Amino acid sequence: MTFSATVLTLYPEMFPGPLGVSLAGRALSEGKWSIDPVHMRNFAKDKHRTVDDTPAGGGAGMVLKVDILAAAIDHARATNPGAPVLAMTPRGRPISQARIRQLAEGPGVILLCGRFEGFDERIFEGRDVEEISVGDIVLSGGECAALMVLDACIRLLPGVMGAPSSGTEESFEDGLLEYPHYTRPTEWEGRAIPEVLRSGDHAKIAAWRKHQAEDDTRSRRPDLWERHRDARVQPASGARRKNEDLGS
């Protein structure tokens, strides 16, 4: 099954862009995934191909019209059935590695790229659109965010990365940041590779890496650490609640 990406955008020339080189580019040429950038102006009915209008209630900027968005989404769903529709917006839920893995395991994705002040709000309920964010930043448009999401999905497709473990031994896959890496030279400017990594003792190396991942996550991303810690204790507490409900 080929992972199929449909991108609804006002700048189709931005795709595949950087996804046409390196691992993603090779996978594209090998048919492991496909991309169809669709110009949203194609769905405008007036002679000026208008896709936006002034905000209701006043304010700066322009808003993408709901009828144009709906027509573009309907077209994409007809050509890419089964694929979820994701709108790139800073108002969306932060995308996670778990969600990326779900998308990569599916038939593909339809990405809706905003511009100007964003989307007419009615499109999200009217067409069952999932709002996602790639971070607490504001971009000029959703295209760069769409490229990020696609890159994250494509590298997880079967046969794209060399080693099968490459997609699992990474940051966020187990709720932690990845452990630090080293390679030759063994010593550089008085700084040596940690001795345990040169010991050949795989059990000690695994324990060191786990400790480093936990320590780095705790210090650098306390939000991730709290979620990871909660996830570890939740099954036990859940089991206790179940036993209490049974009267044991």
Image: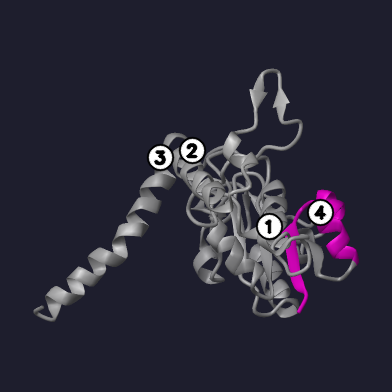
Quadrant where the image shows the C terminus: bottom left
Q: Amino acid at mark 3?
A: Pro
Q: Are marks 1 and 4 in contact (CB under 8 Å)?
A: no
Q: Amino acid at mark 4?
A: Leu
Q: Amino acid at mark 1?
A: Ser
Q: Which residue is mark 3?
A: 222
Q: Picture quarter containing residue 156?
A: bottom right
Q: Residue 221's mark?
A: none
Question: Secondary structure beneath disc 1?
Answer: helix
> Vertical placement of 96 versus 178: above or below?
below
> Comparing marks 3 and 4, which lies closer to the viewer?
3
Q: Nearer the viewer, residue 3 or 117?
A: 3
First to last magenta residue range: 1-29
> Comparing marks 3 and 1, which lies closer to the viewer?
1
Q: Give the mark, 3 or 1, whose residue is nearer the N terminus.
A: 1
* Magenta span includes 7: yes
Q: Are marks 2 and 4 in contact (CB under 8 Å)?
A: no
List x then y, in percent, for residue 189: 70, 18
Disc 3 crowd rating (10 Å Cα; few below 14, some 14-19, many 20+) is: few
Q: Which residue is mark 1?
A: 166
Q: Give the mark, 1 or 4, whose residue is nearer the N terminus.
A: 4
Q: Is residue 16 visible?
A: no
Q: Give the mark, 2 or 1, whose residue is nearer the N terminus.
A: 1
Q: Are marks 2 and 3 in contact (CB under 8 Å)?
A: no
List x then y, in percent, for residue 231: 36, 58
> Comparing marks 1 and 4, which lies closer to the viewer?
1
> Vertical placement of 145 versus 158: above or below?
above
